[in-house]
Image: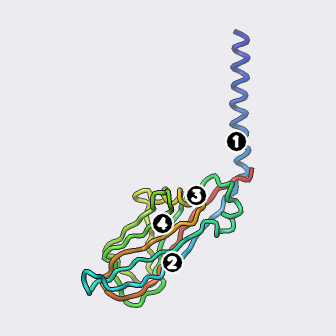
Amino acid sequence: MKTLLKLSFILLLIGFGNTGCEKIKSLADVTFDANYESTIDVDVVPSALKATNGTFFETVTIDPLSNSDMATYANLIKDIDVVEVSAEVISLSTPVQLISATLNASSTGFTDASWSFANETLTVGKVLTLSNDAGQFDNLQKILTSKNVFTVTLQGQTDVNEATFSLLMTFKTRVTANPL
């Protein structure tokens, strides 16, 4: 019985010791903002379906390691938290209404982070804050965690058959890394 009691006590100490080491290790965590911006220049062209409507399909790429902190701690990252995703209209040649549009962040081997819009009127300075309603931030987090270059695609249809506009895409993240 005494041997069993001693063995239980030793196992209990080992369990507390391991938990304590993890707490001490977490004191070395480094947390930083890793934000990514890219401008999507959109050129609306006449649709084959109706001459009064236009369509567009544009892509840009983003390299997660373009952020210097992310590059420094790339192999030491514990967690990436997507804080906000937004698109701001920074230029517009003529008034435009998006009849329908889809924005995707994608990388091979991962589920896309995808947002859809309908009947959205664009004006310079308008900010579209993209939600996490369908778990898009989780998908984006997995893409960013891979640290591979990913593609942002914007496609859709407008109420005009010819226009240009630019969107400033912003991906705000909070990264936790540990150098130990």
Q: Quadrant of residue 8?
A: top right
Look at label 1 and name its amino acid.
Glu
Is 108 left, or right, of 16 in this rendering? left
Residue under numbered circle 2: 168
Residue 36 rendering spot, x and y as whole percentages: 58, 70
- Does 167 appear above or below 34? below
Q: CA distance from mark 2 to mark 1?
A: 40 Å
Q: For the residue marked with disc 4, what is the amino acid?
A: Ala
- Nearer to the camera, 153 or 85: 153
Upstream in the sequence, badge 3 or badge 4?
A: 4
Which of discs 2 and 4 lies nearer the camera? The answer is 4
Reading the image, the residue beneath label 3 is 146
Q: Residue at x 73, y 51 (%)?
A: 28
- Tell which circle, 1 or 3, labels the residue nearer the N-terminal end: 1
Question: Which residue is drawn at the image coordinates 70% and 47% (left, top)?
Answer: 26
Determine the secondary structure under disc 4.
strand
SS class of the residue under badge 2?
Answer: strand
Q: What residue does disc 1 label?
A: 22
Relative horizontal placement of residue 36, taking residue 177 as reference (left or right):
left
Q: Amino acid at mark 3?
A: Ser
SS of the residue under disc 1:
helix
Q: Please provide percent x and percent y for residue 145.
A: 58, 57
Left or right? Give the position of 58 relative to 28.
left
Q: Amino acid at mark 2?
A: Leu
Residue ID for mark 4: 105
Q: Nearer the viewer, mark 2 or mark 1?
A: 2
Question: Is label 3 in a helix, a strand or a loop?
Answer: loop
